[in-house]
Image (cartoon, rainbow, N blue to C red):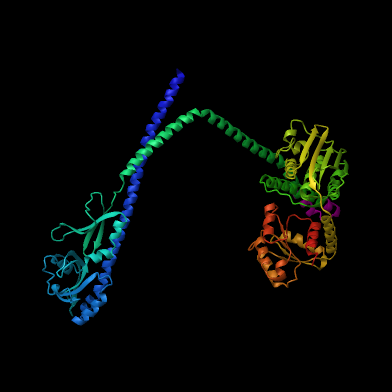
Amino acid sequence: MNSKLTRKQIQMQAVLLFFITFVLVEICSYFLYQNQLKEAKLKADYTAQTTIGRVKSQLNHYLAESNLIKHMIEAGYTVDDQQFSVLSALMQDDQNIIKAHELAKDGIVTQIYPMRGNEAALGLNILENPARRQEANLAKESGEYTIAGPFELQQGGIGALLFDPIYTTDDNGNQTFWGFSILVLDWESFLDEIELNTLEEAGYTYEIWKTSPSTSEYVSVAHSGNFRRSDALEVLCTVPNDTWHFEIVPKNGWISPAQGISSIILGFILSLLFAIGFLQFRMHRYKDALHAKELEKAAQEAQAANEAKTRFLFNMSHDIRTPMNAIIGFSDLLEKHLDEKDRAVDYIAKIKSSSSFLLSLINYVLEMARIESGKASLKIELGSYSELVDLLNAVFEPSIRKKNLSYICYNTVAHDAILCDRTKIREILLNIISNSIKYTPEGGKISVKIEELPSEKAGFASYRITVKDNGIGMSQEYLPHIFEEFTREHTSTESQVTGTGLGLPIVKSLVNLMGGTIHVESELGVGTTTTVCLTLALPTKEQLEARHHKEEILEQSVQTLAEKRVLLAEDNDLNAEIALTILEENGIHTERVKDGALCVKAVQNAPEDYYDIILMDIQMPNMNGYQAAEAIRALPGKRGTIPIVAMTANAFSEDAKKSLDAGMNEHVAKPLAADKLIALIARYTKAK
C-alpha cells in the first residue's frame, strides 16, 4: 500500500512539475517576445531614421543650389534672364528631380528655367494662390527655407515647392522683402531619390503625413498601399519650416502568429521532457548514490595525496634547514679563518657537501615533476658497464670509507658495451646504492652484482643488477608503499638520515620507462635486497669504432684548448666570474657579454674565425639566449656556424628541445663541474 502511495505521489509530482514548467516557459516566452518586439521596433526606427536622413540630405542639397542666386540678389546684383538661365542650368541634376527654378519678385513668378513646359506658372502670385499662400507667407514672415506640397502644379503634374525667401538691405541696414527663389521638385522623382521603395523590399509598409497649416487636417505625403495601421511606429521628420510624421510597420506585424503557436508547442514539449526526466531521476537514484560514493572516494584519494605532500614538506623541512644552516654557518666561519688553511679547506669541503645535498633535493623534485608530466624520454647512446662500475666506485668511495663499510661490486657481463640512456641507468644505481649506504650502519656490508642473462631478442642482452645490504631494513607493512611519492618509514630526525621520499619512486618510474622490472625484499633489522632487470640493445662494430675514434680526437683537443677563444653570454656576475676563472685557469681566452644582443653584436664585429664556441645563458635582458642563437644562425658565412652551447638553470627536456630548435648544438644544465665544462669545449672545438 505504501509502495503504491509513494508511486502515486511521484506521479502527482511529475504532473505538477509539468504544469509549473509549462507556465514558466510561457512566461519566459512572453518576455522573449517582448524583447523581440523591442528589437524589431529598434530596427524599424533605424530604418525610418535612415530614410529621414536621406530626405534631409536631399533637401539641404537643394537649399545649397538655391542659395547661389539668393545671395547674388541679396548682395545687390541684378540677375537678368540670360544670367538666370545660365545659373539655373548649372543647378539641374541628372535625375531631373528639379523640374524648374523660379524667381518670384514680390511673390509673383517673373523668371523660369526652363521655360518650355513651365509657361503656365509665369505671372503666378505665390502669396495669393490658395494652394500655396499658406507656406509662402510662412516663409516670408519667418525668413526660413520652407517646403510646400505635394500638390497639383500650375504647369501640370504633382510636385513640391521649396521657398527660399530673399531680403535686400538698404544703406541704413533695413531689410526689405524682395521675393522668393523657388525650386519646383518633381514629386515622383524625389520619392525615387530618397529610395522609399527599399522599405517595401525590406518588408515594411509606411506612410509619411503632415498636418495642413491652414486647416490642421491630416495630409498624406507618401504611402505604400492601404496603410493606416494602429500599431505603426511613428518617427518625426523635421523638414524646412514643417514637420512630417513617418509611420512604419512590418508587413506581417511585429510578432507573427506562428511564434505564439510555437511557444505553446515548445512549452508542452519542455514540460513533458522535464516530467519524464523527473521520473527517470527518481528511478535512478541508486545509481546517483553510487556515483556520489565514487566522487567521495576520489576526493578522499585527492585529500590523501595532499596529505602525503604535506607530510613530505614537514619531513623534508629539517633536511633542508640542516644543510642550509651548515652552508651559512661554515661560510661565516670561512670568512673569519681564511688565513688558516686547514680550517678553510675543511669548511669548504663541508660547504660543498651540503650544497651537493641541496642540489640532489632539487634534482629529485624536478625529475619527479618531469616523469609525472609524461615528458621524460630516453636518450639512447653508447655506454659501458665497466665505466659505470668505475663511476660508482669513485662516487661512493668517500662515503664508504667514512662509515667503514664493506663494499664489493661484481661485474660479470659478457657484453660490456650497450646502447642505453646512460644518465638514467646511472641515476637508477646511484639512488639504490645511495639508499643502502644511508641506511647501513657503520661496519656494515654492501654488495653490487651486475650479471648478464640470455636474451630472446637478437641484438639485445638482458642484465640483472642486484644491490644487497645488511642495513636497518624496512617493515613488511611499509614495503607496499616504498614506490609512493613523498613517503618515508622514518623521518630524518628518527633515522638520522636525510632524504626526500622521492628516490625510489623515481627509480621505479625510470625502470618502467626502460621497459624493465624492479623488485625489493627487506626485513626490519636484517637488510634490503633490490633487484633491477633490464633488456638493452647491443652496439654494432661500426658504433664501437666510431666511439673509439671520437675519444682520441677529444683527448687531442683538450691538450690544445689554450689556442681557443670562447664567447660567454651571461648576465649574472657571480656565474660569469666562476666560468671565466675556470676557463682562464685552463689557458682559454674568454670574452664575456651580459645579454643576447651584445652577444650577436660581438659575433658580427669579430672576424669570421675569431670565436671557436659560444657558451649561452638563456634568461638574459634585452635579448634571451633563444633569440640570440636564432640571430647568430641567420648570419652569413662561418659566423652562422659557430658552435653554441646553452648553459642554463632550465633543466627540463622541453627546455633542451627549445635550445636545439633555436639552433644551439647542445643544452647543459647548471651547475656544471669544471672538468665537464673543459671536456664540453674540447668536444665542440676539436675540428677547428
Which residue shows up at 39% across the image and 32% down it?
18
Residue 107 visible in rendering: no
Which of the 4 quarters of the picture holds residue 335? bottom right
Where residue 491 appears, x then y in whole percent? 74, 37
User: 456 and 596: which one is in front?
Assistant: 456
Where residue 592 appears, x then y in whole percent? 72, 65
Magenta-drawn stretch, dominant element (helix, strand or loop): helix
Which of the 4 quarters of the picture holds residue 453? top right
* First to last magenta residue range: 328-346
The count of marks equals 0
Where residue 565 appears, x then y in whole percent? 77, 67
Q: Is residue 124 above or below residue 208?
A: below
Residue 300 visible in rendering: yes
Where residue 224 appears, x then y in whole percent? 24, 56
Which residue shows up at 24% across the image and 80% down it?
86
User: 232 and 468: which one is in front?
Assistant: 232
Looking at the image, residue 615 sits to the left or right of residue 46; the answer is right
Looking at the image, residue 105 sits to the left or right of residue 679; the answer is left
Q: Tell me the quadrant of the picture where the N terminus can be found.
A: top left
Q: Is residue 502 above or below residue 176?
A: above
Which residue shows up at 80% across the image and 66% down it?
687
